[in-house]
Amino acid sequence: MVYQVYKIVDGDTLDSVSKCFNCSCDELIRLNGIDESNFISNSFIVVPKNSLYSNYTVKSGDTLYDISSRYGIDLNLLYAINGLDDGDIIYPNQDLLVPSNVSMYLTKSGDTIKDIVSSLNYDISDFVDENGNLELMADQIVVYKRD
């Protein structure tokens, strides 16, 4: 996942910041090990880069498979974006992150940039522009196309 640093200002709450960056309060808590009691003005937190994701609010009857199909993304990528594991349960009104106007790839053990761009039929210079310098590891999310 791609992140950025955000400086908390007076009046910010976990809820207001999560809405601003299209993520859930749970995601902010998980990323930063914080809660409302230690959400302090003039401190810095890590937030998802908001141009890459949108929120999806789980509805009764939704499954992760259904959501991944609806958004045309790999199920394992949906797990990774949201810090979920196979078998995790989702609940109505839970917020999940889904890619927004961007295509992503979840790396596998042994992947190289050359292998990835070749399999995606993507230009290597565009790939590097989207992702910067990468040291590939398994289960890393990389951007390969902005819509």
Image: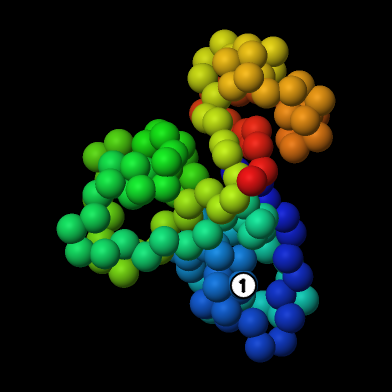
Residue 38: quadrant of the picture: bottom right
Residue sitting nearer the eye, 2 or 118? 118
The answer to whether residue 116 is seen in the rendering is no
Residue 89 placed where, x, y %?
24, 50
> Residue at left 74%, top 59%?
5
Relative to 57, is 12 on the left or the right? right
**Which residue, as the protein is rendered here, is positioned at the far left?**
61
Q: Secondary structure at mark 1?
A: helix
Q: Which residue is drawn at the image coordinates 48% and 62% (left, top)?
A: 55
- Label 1 crowd bin: few (<14), some (14–19), many (20+), radius 10 Å: few
| Left or right of residue 11: residue 75 | left
User: Label 1 sits on what residue type?
Assistant: Cys
Residue 51, x across and y down, in percent: 66, 57
Q: Residue at x 42, y 47 (%)?
A: 71
Q: Residue at x 68, y 23 (%)?
A: 122
Q: Is residue 59 left or right of residue 40?
A: left
Location of residue 49 (image quadrant): bottom right
Q: Quadrant of the N terminus?
A: top right
131 on left or right of 100? right
Q: Which residue is mark 1?
A: 20
Question: Residue 21: in sight, yes or no?
Answer: yes
Q: Nearer the viewer, residue 16 or 75?
A: 75
Q: Position of residue 42 (x, y in %)?
A: 77, 76
